[in-house]
Image (cartoon, rainbow, N blue to C red):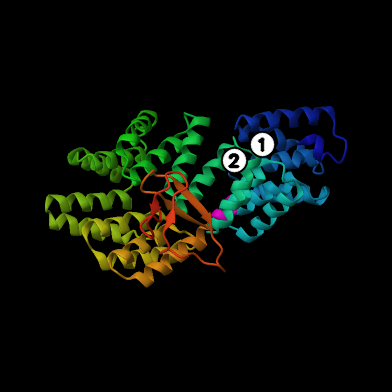
């Protein structure tokens, strides 16, 4: 960083301090870097390297206001530069100045698209703006350049999840896990997706691993509770979800599961109380919609299920996942025109049509052109096993 940004000669002392500060940042010790750099800036407020390094340290230390101050000072002293723009973008985003942050990140990308960090930050902006299709295309290009970047691949997996393509997201988390077998995010997300697809035997070792790595983490308990629920170990599941609520009393996933367990027990009073608690938390986080919609489906509350799905599509615009569930529900209810329109939304939001052959389980993803459309009622031939793929029943729902 210092060799590329230096615009004026620094003393040997200041250069040594900056080198030490950069080492501290590489070792995730931002407070040590700040302690080293602040005196340098006090005596030389035009030392660009020190300003930028200090700004990076403030970002890492979660002090975005201070980061913006010193990075804007550096910006006045140096022509537009990738590092300054990137970290200004990060700091502005932390302050909630989203549009300004996006401008900075896009400028950093324009200045230097050879660094994985800026690809990741731009992808994150698209993701947070609910531009999942754009994020997917962007991250796919990023992975062509940086196939072993864990951050990019993890965000790619999260984007696929938002688009309701669970099998592809599962494959991506498996790749992240191979790159870093100890990464908790990969372990827990991989297990979660397997459980969403009702694949408890495959999920079991990863649920176990999550509970070994961090048994006190409420997410580990949610995974264990879900595994036990799918295995019909209801008492064990109940214990897990109650433990989650001790840490997070408004966790809608745990509340929803307690509602279902009360339903299985025939305890109407407990079911009503916990359902009211869960409904009060709807919309608090993106996953709340999946939790409650799934519960309504399990309880046979069809009107509430459809209404929840429609509200989910508005709360997370750009996500294809609720539209997939709506398409399936409309088909079940015999509302074929509404089902067709829901599938069309899925295709437009994803940019592709996902089909699974019932014979060989091969999945294909066909590019979708909104001007040409896609006939969901036209049967097709599998290129692998050559059987007829019946449509629309072969449109993949996970």
Residue 380 in view of the camera: yes
Q: Would you say the residues marked 2 and 1 are in contact, meaning their CB atoms lie under 8 Å apart? A: yes
Above or below, 33 against 121 in this view is above
Question: Dot 2 surroundings within 10 Å: few (below 14), some, or many (20 or more)?
Answer: some
User: What's drawn in magenta, residue-wise?
Assistant: 124-128
**Residue 174 placed where, x, y %?**
46, 36
Residue for badge 1: 34
Name the residue tied to disc 2: 61
- Could you tell me how many numbered marks the image carries? 2
Q: Nearer the viewer, mark 2 or mark 1?
A: 2
Above or below, 125 relative to 359: below
Determine the residue located farthest toward the left in the rendered image. Answer: 266
Say if residue 95 shows up in the picture. no
Q: Earlier in the sequence, mark 2 or mark 1?
A: 1
Q: Nearer the viewer, residue 9 or 230?
A: 230
Please tell me which residue is depicted at 24% across the width and 42% down the height of the picture.
Answer: 229
């Amino acid at each position: 960083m210092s060799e590329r940004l230096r615009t004026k000669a620094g003393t040997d002392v200041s250069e040594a301090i900056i080198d030490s500060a950069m080492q501290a940042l590489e070792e995730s010790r931002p407070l040590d870097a700040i302690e080293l750099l602040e005196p340098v800036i006090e005596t030389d407020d035009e030392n660009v390297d020190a300003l930028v390094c200090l700004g990076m340290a403030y970002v890492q230390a979660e002090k975005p206001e201070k980061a913006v101050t010193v990075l804007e000072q550096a910006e006045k002293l140096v022509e537009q530069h990738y590092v300054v723009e990137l970290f200004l973008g990060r700091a502005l985003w932390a302050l909630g100045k989203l549009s300004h942050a996006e401008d900075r990140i896009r400028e950093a990308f324009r200045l230097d698209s050879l660094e994985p960090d800026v690809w990741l930050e731009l992808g994150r902006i698209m993701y947070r703006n609910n531009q999942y299709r754009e994020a997917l295309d962007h991250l796919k290009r990023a992975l062509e350049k940086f196939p072993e970047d864990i951050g990019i691949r993890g965000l790619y997996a999260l984007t696929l999840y938002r688009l309701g393509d669970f099998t592809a997201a599962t494959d991506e988390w498996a790749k992240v896990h191979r790159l870093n077998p100890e990464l908790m995010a990969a372990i827990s997300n991989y297990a979660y997706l397997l459980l969403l697809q009702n694949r408890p035997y495959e999920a079991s070792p990863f649920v176990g691993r999550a509970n070994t790595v961090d048994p006190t983490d409420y997410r580990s308990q949610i995974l264990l509770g879900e595994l036990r629920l799918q295995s019909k170990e209801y008492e064990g599941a109940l214990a897990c979800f109650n433990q989650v609520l001790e840490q997070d009393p408004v966790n809608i996933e745990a509340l929803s599961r307690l509602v279902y367990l009360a339903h299985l027990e025939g305890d109407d009073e407990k079911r009503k109380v916990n359902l009211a608690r869960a409904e009060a938390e709807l919309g608090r986080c993106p996953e709340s919609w999946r939790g409650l919609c799934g519960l309504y489906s399990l309880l046979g509350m069809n009107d509430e299920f459809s209404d929840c799905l429609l509200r989910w599509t508005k709360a997370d615009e750009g996500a294809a996942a609720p539209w997939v569930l709506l398409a399936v529900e409309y088909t079940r209810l015999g509302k074929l025109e509404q089902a067709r329109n829901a599938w069309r939304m899925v295709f437009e939001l994803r940019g592709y049509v996902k089909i699974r052959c019932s014979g060989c389980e091969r999945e294909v993803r066909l590019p979708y052109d909104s001007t040409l459309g896609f006939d969901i009622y036209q049967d097709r031939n599998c290129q692998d096993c050559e059987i007829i793929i019946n449509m629309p029943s072969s449109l993949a729902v996970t």
